[in-house]
Image: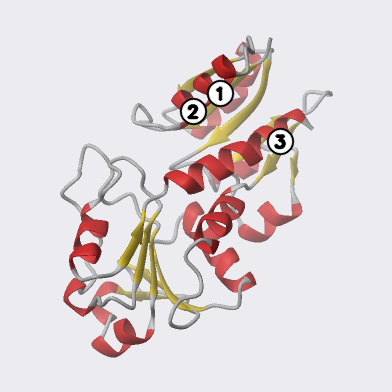
Amino acid sequence: MARYGLIGKNIDYSFSKAYFTSKFEKEKRRDTYQNFDLEHIDLLPDIVAQYPDAKGFNVTIPYKESVMELLDRIDKEALEIGAVNTIKKLKDGRLAGYNTDHYGFAKSLADFLPLEAKTGLVLGTGGAAKAVRYVLKAMGFEYLSVSRQKTEETITYKELTPEIMASHFLIVNCTPLGTYPNVDECPSIPYQQITDKHFLFDLIYNPSETEFLKRGFAKGAKVCNGLKMLEYQAEKAWTIWKS
């Protein structure tokens, strides 16, 4: 019997515990999965010491980037992305970090291609956004990163002109805006510029239909929530833990 878990903050809503608990029951495994709601990521070593039977962890908001400093080894792709969402405890007790978000996003996105053109907007700049950008770059997309604050790498929401909206057909919400229980929130993009040529992908899965997706759907856009992406990345994490 082995223990697995989710590292994050304010994660009562999380999909992972229900997903893996159901998986273990179906496969008649005696393994367990639990949430580790940490006030600070520096508490991770205490969790590892407290649960010697723990074999692996998923990592979610807001620790996908900061957790990297606590790991002994980081997979090449996770290093390139700059974020970790899967940790495996090696046989010698060291912790190795991986990223399966990019795999989940790529698999999910593939079902909706081709689009009008390989152009996109990535909303947000956190760990999930980094995985999305990694995938879009690998797929040959031209994209803009959008954030509340302007930087050398990002534009602001106020800079989303009708021309930009009309020429960027994939819009990915990588922010937590709209996550349960704050279901009335959404990124402040000019939804009036959305058309039936757009595809809105929301990494949020709870609720299944976010305000972001509702507004896009109302304009005729194709829409997709983050549930399939999560399932794909969870199974990839399982493959890593069992390898």
Residue corresponding to mark 1: 23
Q: Is residue 186 visible?
A: no
Look at 37% across and 71% down and name the residue there. 146
User: Mark 1 or mark 3: which is in front?
Assistant: 1
Horizontal and vertical percent for residue 201?
Answer: 38, 60
In this rendered view, identify the residue nearer to me: 107 or 2.
107
8 vs 185: above or below: above
N-term-proximal mark, 3 vs 2: 2
Residue corresponding to mark 2: 19
Residue corresponding to mark 3: 239
Tag 2's secondary structure? helix
Q: Is residue 188 left or right of residue 8?
A: left
Q: Residues within 10 Å of mark 2 (few under 14, many from 20)?
A: some
Tag 3's secondary structure? helix
Q: Is residue 44 visible?
A: yes
Say how the picture is coloured.
Answer: secondary structure
Q: Residues within 10 Å of mark 3 (few under 14, many from 20)?
A: few
Q: Is residue 176 left or right of residue 220?
A: right
Horizontal and vertical percent for residue 44?
Answer: 57, 27
N-term-proximal mark, 1 vs 3: 1
- Mark 1–mark 3 Cα distance, whole angstroms, equals 13 Å
Residue type at numbered disc 2: Tyr
Q: Quadrant of the C terminus?
A: top right
